[in-house]
Image: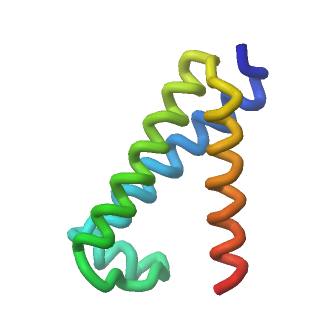
Amino acid sequence: MLPTWLRRAFLATSVMNVSAALLLLPFAAPVRELVGVPPGEHALHLVTIAMFVLVFGVAYGYAGWTGRADELFVAVCAAGKLSFVAILTGF
């Protein structure tokens, strides 16, 4: 069983990832512009990124809802979040 704080973190991250996935879809260009996200170059790139973000969001939600997550899943999640922060810091 996951600790309560980690379950809450997974549930919050799930909401953020699903929201970000919707924001990355091509039809959300006006919303991206409103919140200051750079425009996408090609719709295929946006949809591909949105798909990966959505898949992780659903996985985070499942882990938070059930309270179970494999150690490898938690490690991959942590690596993904840290790499995202590194990319944002680098740019």
Q: Give the quadrant of the C terminus.
A: bottom right
Give the percent coordinates (x, y) of residue 87. 64, 74
**Visual colour scheme:** rainbow
Residue in the picture at 47% in, 76% down: 35
The residue nearer to you, when weighing 12 against 85, is 85
Relative height, residue 34 to residue 5 (above, below): below
* Left or right: 66 in relation to 70: left
Residue in the picture at 66% in, 63% down: 83
* Left or right: 40 in relation to 83: left
Answer with the quarter of the image where residue 38 lies: bottom left
Give the percent coordinates (x, y) of residue 25. 28, 64
Relative height, residue 77 to residue 46 (above, below): above
The residue nearer to you, when weighing 74 against 6, is 74
Give the percent coordinates (x, y) of residue 48. 32, 62
The residue nearer to you, when weighing 84 against 37, is 84
Q: Give the quadrant of the N terminus.
A: top right
* Left or right: 56 in relation to 42: right
Residue extending farthest to the top is 1
* Left or right: 56 in relation to 81: left
Relative height, residue 66 to residue 58 (above, below): above
Give the percent coordinates (x, y) of residue 59. 49, 34
Relative height, residue 22 to residue 62 (above, below): below
Residue in the picture at 72% in, 20% down: 2
Answer with the quarter of the image where residue 64 lies: top right
Residue in the picture at 63% in, 44% down: 77
